[in-house]
Structure formats: structure tokens, C-alpha cells
Image (cartoon, rainbow, N blue to C red):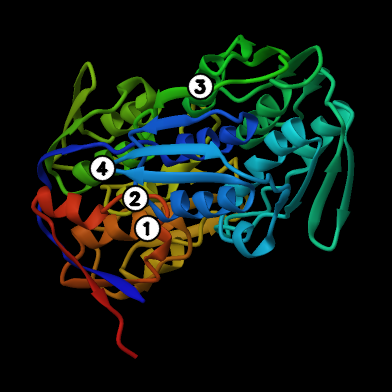
């Protein structure tokens, strides 16, 4: 098992290129289940979650090959309809195969998902929508069993905004008979990216980027080539890292509009930010100002930035609050940051932060993907050498993070843990 070792105290300086979005690539890969033709995805990041999805799709009859960020996917031989527990438990995004399987094959057996321990993240909204489209669904022995010869269009009103729910039902609806209307649909860029691919495959989707999406079902979909959007969460993480270390970093290959909410909060914290096309420069402040944050669905402040921004506020000059509205259990990084000298107190769905002048190194342990990123940021500014254990979490969502940090001047390395 690996750990990441960081010698803190150096400002980040230089430029890096942002990888393709994991959260966009996974549903794009699941869309391969909807066609017998080949899909070509470019700008795909090399991550554990991508490998997990490739293994899952192979079980379902989709063969794939990846080289230098170019991923080819195509159905070959017999199709499968069961997504087994042994694979699905490793990644919650595996539930994204449910809608496409049901739409294409008329049946699906998908294990209830696993992944990061940041809350229940129930799939009841997915199941309720599929039932409204005519599916017969039973939960048996930890599996979702769904059957429907052909789904029928319906008006779906999501009780809460759900990104994977919107993506799953959108994929189910493209092969359904008739029109499907999704109300209170997610606005995230990853949803738009999926809709763009589906339309290139021959789907008829309108209203993308709004809360009402209309889908006119078609009989078949073809192949397509598509470039995955930049990873806004990776970009935001490096923006926070630059601010936190009082650095000067240029990010290339991102979409600045995808990080508008974070950009405003970083400016409030004292950072100087300039963007031009797909390029953004952030200069960290001499003194980090305290800023209150409340997470919200896009275009609000993303929950996936919450842990990293908490780390930033832990060294701000004053008191701030972070309120989490998306997940009920996303403060597991707080005890680890406190081990490093931060003064954080969780009160319900809020953490109250009293900024300290500097964090101290300590052996710490990652609990989930974004929590692990926050601990890396903390290590960058801590006095001494910080060891971060269980970094397999970070490998799920950040492509070669230690290499990119070294390019910016950080003293960081990966090492084997010896017991």
C-alpha cells in the first residue's frame, strides 16, 4: 500500500494542464451500452475509477482499449445484464449502467453501489423514475432487478437535484418509446457533456443546461467520437492549492465558467485570478481572509470542493463556516486536519473554523476521495514532513497528482508503507 509524503512550506509556482473529467467520463463510458457501434472517447484520464468501469463494461459485453487518453469501446459477443457486487462495490458511479442496460436489453440486475463513505446517496430517485417509465423493479439480495421490454416516455419530476439520477434516466429515455420530460434536472457540466455525446449518437435531447430536459426516444443509436470535458474538480483543487501556498500557478486546458462559484470565493479570500479562454492564472494572497461557504448544486459551490476549501480556511486569518447541504457525512477530513493543528468544530451539517497561522505535520489517513485531496493541501503548508496514508482514494480521482505538484515545485513523493 502506498502513502504520499510531503515536505511542506513551499509556494506552488508554474503551469500545469488539467486532465479530462472523471465524473464526465464515467457516464460517457456507460453510454456504450446503448449501441452496437463503436464509441471513441478522447481526453480520458488514467484513473482507478476508469479502470473499474472498463472491467464492469467487459462483464456486460463491452470491450475496451485505452492508449494515451483515447478510449475505444464496442459491444462484442454476448451481452450481459448483471453488474456484480464485486465490481460495483468499488465505485458508486457503477449504478450508471442500470438505465442503459434496461433501455437496450429490457432487463438489468445491478448490485447496490459502494464507493466513498460520504453518506447514503440513495438511488431511490433513479428507481422511482424507471418505474414511472414502466419498469418492474425488485430489490433482492442486495441487487436491483429491473425488467421492461421497452421503456415508455414519462414526465419525471425529481424530488431533489441528482446528477447521476439525471444521467441514468436520460440514458434510459433515449431508447424509450415516446417523449420523456425530466423536471428539476441537474445542471452540472457533466450532464451536458453526456447529452452532447448522446445527441452525436443519434439521440434527440433538448433543454440541456436547464432544469427541464426533453428526450424524444429513438429506435437505435450509432457510434460517435467525443472529447471529454476538463475536470473542474481537479482544476479547483489546484486553484485552492495555489491560494493556500501563496503561490502563482497557471492552469491550462480548463473551462473557467465551470469553476465560477469557487473563483468568487477564492477572490473573497484574497486571491488574484485572471482567465483567458481555457487558461487561468491564480496568485495567492499574502493573507488568507476568512470566507463562509455553503455547498449547492451547480452552478453553486460544489460539494466536491468543500473539503479542500475547509483546508484553506484552516489557515485563514479569522473565523469562517462551511455548511454542507449535499451529503450528510462529509466532514471525515476534520479530525485529521485537527491532528495537524487546525481548529475545526463540526456542528450538525456545519464546520466552524478558527484559522491558525500554520499547520503542523502529522501522520494522517484519507477517508474518501476529496478528503484525501484536502489532506494533501494541508501537507503542502504544514511545518515538517506529512505522511498521508490510504492514498488509493486519491488515485480514484486525480491523475498523477504528486507528479503535477512536483512540476509546480512541491516536495512530494509516493512511497510504500512498510509494516
Q: Is residue 388 above or below residue 185?
A: below
User: In screen coordinates, is 56 left or right of 341?
Assistant: right
Quadrant showing the N terminus: bottom left
Q: Which percent across, then down, holds residue 57?
A: 57, 47
The C terminus appears in which quarter of the rendering?
bottom left
Residue at 67 percent of width and 19 percent of height: 220
Of 71 and 351, the residue lying toward us: 71
For the residues labelled 4 and 3, the Cα–Cα distance comes to 28 Å
- Asked whether disc 1 touches disc 2, contact meaning CB atoms under 8 Å apart, the reply is yes
Q: CA distance from mark 1 to mark 2?
A: 6 Å
Q: Which mark is residue 398?
A: 2
Labels 2 & 3 near each other (Cβ < 8 A)? no
Please report contact status of discs 4 and 3: CB closer than 8 Å, yes or no: no
Name the residue that disc number 1 marks.
395
Q: Earlier in the sequence, mark 1 or mark 4?
A: 4
Please say if the residues under marks 3 and 1 sit with CB atoms less than 8 Å apart. Answer: no
Give the label, 2 or 3, closer to the camera: 3
Query: How many residues crowd mark 3 within 10 Å: few (<14), some (14–19), many (20+)?
Result: many
Amino acid at each position: 500500500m502506498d502513502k504520499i509524503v510531503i515536505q511542506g512550506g513551499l509556494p506552488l509556482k508554474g503551469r500545469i494542464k488539467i486532465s479530462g473529467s472523471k465524473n464526465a467520463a464515467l457516464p460517457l463510458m456507460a453510454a456504450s451500452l446503448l449501441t452496437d457501434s463503436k464509441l471513441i472517447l478522447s481526453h480520458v484520464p488514467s484513473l482507478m475509477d476508469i479502470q473499474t468501469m472498463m472491467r464492469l463494461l467487459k462483464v456486460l459485453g463491452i470491450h475496451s482499449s485505452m492508449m494515451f487518453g483515447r478510449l475505444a469501446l464496442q459491444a462484442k459477443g454476448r451481452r450481459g445484464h448483471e453488474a456484480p457486487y464485486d465490481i460495483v462495490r468499488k465505485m458508486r458511479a457503477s449504478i450508471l449502467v442500470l438505465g442503459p442496460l434496461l433501455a437496450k436489453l429490457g432487463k438489468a440486475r445491478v448490485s447496490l453501489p459502494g464507493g466513498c463513505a460520504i453518506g447514503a446517496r440513495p438511488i431511490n430517485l433513479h428507481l422511482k423514475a424507471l418505474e414511472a417509465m414502466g419498469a418492474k423493479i425488485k430489490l433482492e439480495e442486495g441487487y436491483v432487478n429491473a425488467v421492461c421490454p421497452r421503456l415508455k416516455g414519462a414526465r419525471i419530476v425529481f424530488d431533489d437535484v441528482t446528477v447521476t439520477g439525471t444521467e441514468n434516466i436520460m440514458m434510459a429515455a433515449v431508447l424509450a418509446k415516446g417523449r420523456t420530460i425530466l423536471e428539476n434536472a441537474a445542471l452540472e457540466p457533466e450532464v451536458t457533456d453526456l447529452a452532447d455525446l448522446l445527441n452525436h449518437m443519434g439521440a434527440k435531447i433538448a433543454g440541456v443546461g436547464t432544469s427541464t430536459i426533453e428526450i424524444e426516444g429513438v429506435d437505435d443509436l450509432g457510434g460517435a467520437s467525443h472529447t471529454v470535458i476538463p475536470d473542474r474538480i481537479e482544476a479547483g483543487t489546484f486553484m485552492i492549492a495555489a491560494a493556500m501556498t501563496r503561490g502563482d500557478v497557471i492552469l491550462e486546458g480548463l473551462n473557467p465558467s465551470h469553476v465560477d462559484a469557487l473563483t468568487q470565493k477564492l477572490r473573497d479570500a484574497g486571491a488574484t485570478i485572471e482567465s483567458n479562454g481555457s487558461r487561468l492564472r491564480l496568485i495567492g494572497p499574502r493573507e488568507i481572509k476568512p470566507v463562509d461557504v455553503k455547498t449547492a448544486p451547480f452552478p453553486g459551490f460544489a460539494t466536491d470542493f468543500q473539503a479542500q476549501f475547509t483546508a484553506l480556511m484552516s489557515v485563514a486569518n479569522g473565523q469562517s463556516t462551511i455548511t454542507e447541504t449535499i451529503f450528510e457525512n462529509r466532514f471525515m477530513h476534520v479530525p485529521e486536519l485537527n491532528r495537524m493543528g487546525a481548529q475545526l468544530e463540526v456542528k450538525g451539517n456545519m464546520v466552524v473554523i478558527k484559522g491558525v497561522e500554520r499547520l503542523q505535520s502529522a501522520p494522517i489517513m484519507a477517508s474518501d476521495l476529496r478528503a484525501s485531496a484536502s489532506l494533501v493541501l494541508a501537507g503542502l503548508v504544514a511545518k515538517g514532513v506529512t505522511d498521508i496514508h490510504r492514498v488509493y482514494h486519491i488515485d480514484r480521482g486525480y491523475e498523477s497528482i504528486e507528479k503535477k505538484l512536483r512540476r509546480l515545485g512541491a516536495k512530494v513523493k509516493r512511497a510504500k508503507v512498510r509494516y
